[in-house]
């Protein structure tokens, strides 16, 4: 008790204090304060901003009057790095852009380079099917993390464990195929790194059997939950026209009623051979985006089941020694293979000059690569079309008029990944 | 390393001019900053409702030096199912621009041009006239130089400005070769100091 100042026990007067200064000292997140309005900084270390996002919010009471996301805290110059690596080496950094959907990044980049090389039609069918299989698995893993973190932001802890458990099962499969869980770099220009390992399809069957029950759990936990629906319905509404104008793609665009899916619109690899629907809602709010993503996970599993049935035996790399490495065992017995291997690894391969744009449907929307080659063994320019960069920008449009607490809901429902936003 | 420096100042100037016929988009338009807005307004009126991407490329020794690249997609602007969307047309607009010449903004045509234009400004140093909020977006506000330019070194000036101990400089520690001379002496002193510190701590406890 002796440590307390005297005025607390009634002896003497408290010292003069400036309440304004006290508030300023206690809350550095307040940037400016007017009579009615306050400018508040949310992030960049706020737990609900999914990484390092700062949102500068203008608030009037509890209501948001404007929101300006500030990005760039995770900028790592991946495009610049890719320009200084060989074509296949560039995949390692491109993998790390959207770290929740790395395989779809590689997919788009490989498609672009293959177009420049003119080998699009020569990619073996098995490689194309495995590419589809892997991208759909990645889509589910990405949506699992989105669902888990989005639910935690809103105070629901349990869905995270169910979602991450499902994600772990899939990551085990990705690890079995590629050797790495998070940034597999499984694809190569011209095909994939290696065929599926023994026992992969049996483990895939286990996953296929487990999946419907796990999806039912996730739906039961949230979909009809009154707290969840109260927080989600009518929050962050964007109309179809605005969604297109603000460059939204992927689930965020489809929740506004436009069934634009690159897998249907410009079928690449073997997507035109599978039956699947494009989940669409017309409400355009956070709940619609939530439902679209849940439905999408089930459609992905539908595609996976079809790929599993149709998977054909055969090579997984294009038959072109100027691009594909020789089979690893042959290096030990053949001098020519060793030289071939050494040349490709130390010098890479050259790509004819030209520019090309190729895009795939990633978990967050359209991931595109505008690639320019000047005929060298390194790309001249690698421009990414980052899906979450454009999706997140729309927060400026949808945040005004909502409550501060709903900003977290809107960020979560737009599902940004900052490795991709900042690159 | 010689190979890398040659790559940085390569003279193969305009890969897009020797482009083989790859049908990745339906329409390719080449334009200048003066005509850019007319071209884009015409394309928007033709139904290209979405600015899918806006980026740039630096060709260093070409005239004009940069290309600002617009990718447009003809999406419907009202609720549409898969058949209603169909196979939307795509267009690419390449706007050649020289260093120091501003490009007119398209933020009023497509609101999502705001961030990518800032990014092109930030990383290439191409300015956009009429942009409502043109400031750096990815790099820190006080950064010098434009990192995605081809004459910007991979290890930028900021790296040289950052104070670091001599033994952390890469030139002083060739890979897998044990350090010698002054560097070795510094390392040895640091290790000794650390040993002394831990020794005295242990003595106290």
Image (cartoon, coloured by chain):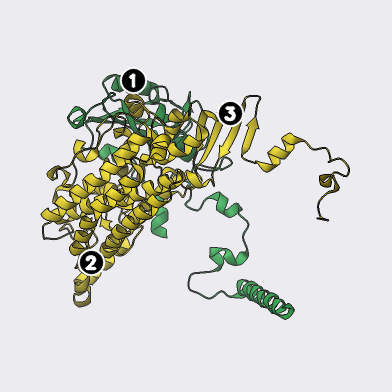
Displayed quadrant of residue B112: top left
The chain that hosts pointer 1 is: B
Mark 2 or mark 3, whichever is nearer to me: 3
* Residue drawn at x 63%, y 35% as measured from the top left: A31
In front of the other: B205 or A180: B205
Q: Is residue B173 left or right of residue A271?
A: right
Residue hosting label 2: A340
Q: Residues within 10 Å of mark 3 (few under 14, many from 20)?
A: few
In this view, the residue in front, A94 or B1, is A94
In terms of secondary structure, where does tag 3 sit? loop
Question: Nearer the viewer's eye, disc 1 or disc 2?
Answer: 1
Residue receiving disc 1:
B41
For label 1, count other residues whose C-alpha is less than 10 Å away and answer few (under 14), some (14-19) or many (20+): few
Asked if residue A172 lies left or right of residue A130, the reply is right
Residue A385, position as x, y percentages in the image: 35, 40
Task: State which tag comes first along the sequence, 2 or 3.
Answer: 3
- Give above or below for A329 relative to A231: below
């Amino acid at each position: 008790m002796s440590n307390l100042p005297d005025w607390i026990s009634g002896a003497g007067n408290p010292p003069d204090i400036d309440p304004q200064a006290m508030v300023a000292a206690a809350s550095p997140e307040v940037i400016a304060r007017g009579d009615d309005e306050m400018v508040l900084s949310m992030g960049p270390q706020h737990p609900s901003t999914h990484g390092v996002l700062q949102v500068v919010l203008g608030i009037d009471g509890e209501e948001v009057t404007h929101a300006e996301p500030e990005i760039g805290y995770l900028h790592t110059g991946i495009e610049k790095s890719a320009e200084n690596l060989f074509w296949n080496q560039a995949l390692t950094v491109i993998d790390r852009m959207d770290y929740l959907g790395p395989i779809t990044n590689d997919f788009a980049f490989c498609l672009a380079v293959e177009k420049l090389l003119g080998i699009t039609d020569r990619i073996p069918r098995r490689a194309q099917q495995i590419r589809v299989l892997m991208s759909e698995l990645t889509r589910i893993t990405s949506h699992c993390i989105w669902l888990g973190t989005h639910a935690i932001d809103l105070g629901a802890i349990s869905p995270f464990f169910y979602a991450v458990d499902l994600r772990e099962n899939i990551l085990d499969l990705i690890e079995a195929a590629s050797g790495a869980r998070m940034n597999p770099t499984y694809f190569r220009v011209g095909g994939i790194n290696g065929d599926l390992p023994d026992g992969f399809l049996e483990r895939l069957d286990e996953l296929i059997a487990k999946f419907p029950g796990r999806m039912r759990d996730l739906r039961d936990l949230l979909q009809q939950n009154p707290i969840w629906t109260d927080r989600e319905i009518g929050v962050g509404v964007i109309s179809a026209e605005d969604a297109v104008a603000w460059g939204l793609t992927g689930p965020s665009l489809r929740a506004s009623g436009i069934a634009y899916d690159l897998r249907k619109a410009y079928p690449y690899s073997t997507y035109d051979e599978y039956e699947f629907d494009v989940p669409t809602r017309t409400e355009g709010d956070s709940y619609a985006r939530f439902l679209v993503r849940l439905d999408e996970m089930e459609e992905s599993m539908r595609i996976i089941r079809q790929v599993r049935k149709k998977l054909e035996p055969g090579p997984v790399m294009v038959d072109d020694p100027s691009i594909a490495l020789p089979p690893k065992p042959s290096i030990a017995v053949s001098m020519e293979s060793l030289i071939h291997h050494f040349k490709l690894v130390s010098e890479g391969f050259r790509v004819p000059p030209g520019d090309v744009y190729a895009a795939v449907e990633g978990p967050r929307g359209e991931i595109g690569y505008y690639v320019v080659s000047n005929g060298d063994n390194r790309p001249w320019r690698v421009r990414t079309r980052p899906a979450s960069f454009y999706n997140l920008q729309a927060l400026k449009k949808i945040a005004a008029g909502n409550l501060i607490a709903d900003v977290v809901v809107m960020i979560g429902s737009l599902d940004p990944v900052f490795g991709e936003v900042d690159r | 390393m010689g190979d890398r420096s040659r790559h940085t100042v390569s003279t193969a100037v305009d890969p897009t001019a020797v482009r083989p016929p790859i049908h990745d988009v339906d329409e390719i338009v080449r334009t200048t900053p003066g005509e850019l807005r007319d071209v884009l307004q015409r394309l928007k009126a033709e139904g290209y409702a979405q600015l899918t991407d806006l980026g740039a490329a630096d060709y260093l020794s070409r005239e004009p030096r940069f290309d600002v690249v617009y990718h447009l997609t003809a999406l419907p602007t009202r609720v549409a199912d898969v058949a209603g969307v169909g196979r939307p047309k795509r267009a690419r607009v390449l706007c050649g621009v020289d260093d120091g010449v501003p490009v007119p903004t398209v933020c009023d045509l497509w609101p999502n041009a705001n961030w990518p234009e800032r990014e092109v400004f930030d990383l290439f140093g191409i300015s956009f006239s009429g942009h409502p909020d043109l400031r750096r977006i990815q790099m820190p506000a006080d950064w010098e130089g434009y990192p995605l330019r081809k004459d910007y070194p991979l290890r930028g000036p900021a790296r040289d400005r950052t104070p670091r101990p001599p033994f952390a400089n890469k030139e002083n520690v060739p890979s897998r070769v044990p350090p010698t001379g002054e560097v070795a002496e510094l390392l040895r002193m640091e290790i000794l100091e650390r040993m002394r510190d831990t020794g005295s701590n242990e003595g106290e406890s």
